[in-house]
Image (cartoon, helix red, strand yellow):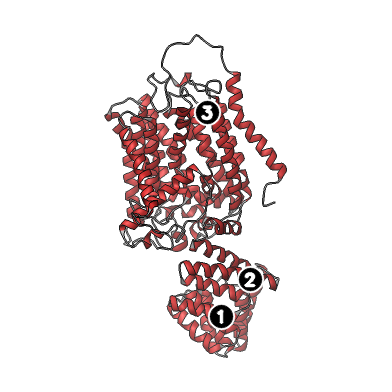
Amino acid sequence: MPNSVSVGQSRVWVAVILFLYCYPMAKTKQNQVPKQPVQKTAAPVAGKQPVQPAAPESKMQSDKWLVVILVAVALLVNAPTLRYGYTLDDPYFTSDNPLVRAGVSSIPEFFKHAAYYGVFKNHDASYRPLMLISFAIEKTLFDFNPVISHGINLVLFALQIFFLYKLLRRIFNHYSAFIPFFIMLLFELHPIHTEVVASVKSRDELLALLFTAISMMQSLRYIDSNKPVSLVLSAFFFFLALLSKESSITFVGILPLTIYFFRDVNMKKIITAVAPYAVMASIYMLMRAAFIESDGEKVRILTNNNALMSAATDGERIATALFIQLKYIILLLFPHPLSYDYSFNQIPIIGFGNPKALLSILVIFGLLGFALVKLKSKNIFSYCILFYFAGAVITSNLLVIIGATMAERFMYTASLGFCMAVVFLLMKLFKSDSVKLSYATAPRVFMTVIAISVLYSAKTIARNEVWQNNLVLYKSGMETAPDSWRAHYLLGVEYTRKIGGEKDPKEKQELAANAVEHLNASNAILPSADNWLLKGYAFEFSGRLDSAVVSYQTTLRLDSNNAKAANNMGAIFLRSNQLDAAIQILSRVVAKDTTFNDALCNLAAAYGNSGNFKASEKYYLMAYRKNPDQPANVFMSMSNIYKFMGDSANAQRYRALLYNALKAGK
């Protein structure tokens, strides 16, 4: 499969996309009725709510073809992701997660642990059982297949666009159907959402907003029709949203805000509609406390994950967090450059005396001030601003420090408020009638939205290509995040992984040189034992054993408990026949961890090569008893040990296991 879209394919895509964008204009011209005598009634202006009552749903403008266009564009622009592999954190929820690998049998475990527990065996701050359940079901039905994973994400994205449009259609029931259509067109195409669609791991974002949209539709249906069953359904789907991702809890505030702005009902009815959300949020928080916070293990936020932890004072932390919020707004307005990583020290810590912090305060509090002043008059821009900040506050690092400095996926929900504001701003700028909006009455609004959508599409298609595999993704970080320790570290990791599979000695050395270059760059930004450990791997895989030993020794000076570095150094001593040194260091590793299979086998081999067959047998048996599924070379060594000891029965036994392992390709 080619790594980029061909010229011919690009032309076809552009032609199809332009047709889909222009179809609404053709449709509105086709359906245009003869002009009627002008009645002297004031046309609603964007920014103020129309005064006439909502039309019954049965009489609303038919909008099936608008939904078809939205779904078609969403699928078309993001279709290339179907040929991509797993990238970044995707393996943590697929092939590298033992609980997910077990399939649906692990479903009860997902409710008892944090999202990353299956990989790291400790509780982080993420409690997302429904997202993990989706991957376990996928594993049971299809095994691990990136095409299936990306396909499921794409279907979820299309479903989400469908229900979000229906939700906006219900929220803005006073307005033309083209307003929610334009909002969703900008939302689904905004390049800042590339990560959510292209990264399999971001299924949590897709599920959370999908279920929230369905839930809010049911809440508004209760407001409009007084059907109690709608409250039950709203509670059910909101609970699913919370189980998908904890950030959904912000809709406990967004729902009453929406009802206040767009429905003329009393406070009692608003409270009744919001009550199911409050109940489900309370249940979710109790589950979270019981399962991932009850063990007394405090979640540690490290500087390498969140640069704000390096702030010397609370003032610096808040000033930098405010500046990050300004960066989000800038990226929404002008989505370039986009990056998969914003770790330490891509965004340096600043204080309130820095002009960037002062500008952030001016913009953020200026917007919030406007929203609060206009709240009573129900100004539409007040709603857009409050929706935006409500969607962004959980991940802002202002209320609570989270596990990352900044990430484009954090703006996924909040950006819906931004897209609303853009459409209503265009309506106000071109003084358009928000109820009778059509191409005939507001051609400049249509053309401007289409122009923005085409630009968004081009950027999204180009940005999608970055997510095709880890090497391409991590290389992109050298342009978009050159000051991030993680961007250099991950590229160094990827080069190191490729060394083992490379046959050409010259290519091995080049890969090792690239790996060491970026690991050194990462170390210069944020020194760590992991960088030295990876350098040891790179040197070892490329045959530079002396340099590998130095790197492992440095790793152990920085982290004396690093068993991997000690084991690898012992293995090098074993291969170079420095048996006493190998036994000495490997014995220390095994004394601390009797389950470390590689260390047990290496120590057994060292004793066997030195002629101490009883000690060799002891450690081989320890490894075998803890893990009978050993590779063929271990069974061959065990057979030889028993042969040297004169135990022909056991020699034959392990020779048979050797043949079985070879047949299994181990």
Q: In the current view of this chain or complex, which residue is farthest to the left? A: 268
Q: The C terminus lies in which quarter of the figure?
A: bottom right
Q: Which residue is mark 1?
A: 571
Q: Nearer the viewer, mark 3 or mark 1?
A: 3
Mark with earlier residue (2, 1): 1
Which percent across, then down, holds residue 578? 57, 88
Where's residue 485, x and y in %? Answer: 49, 63
Q: Is residue 287 above or below residue 260?
A: below
For the residues labelled 2 and 1, the Cα–Cα distance comes to: 22 Å
SS for tag 2? helix
- The reply to whether dot 2 and dot 1 touch (C-beta < 8 Å) is no
Query: Which tag, 2 or 3, sits closer to the chain's start?
Result: 3
Q: Residue furthest bottom?
A: 611
Any part of residue 660 in sight: no
> Which residue is denoted by mark 2 in the rendering?
661
> What's the residue type where badge 2 is placed?
Ala
Residue under circle 3? 445
Residue 112, x across and y down, in percent = 39, 55
Which residue shows up at 43% across the image and 11% down it? Answer: 40
Foreground: 561 or 613?
561
Does residue 604 appear in the picture of this structure? yes
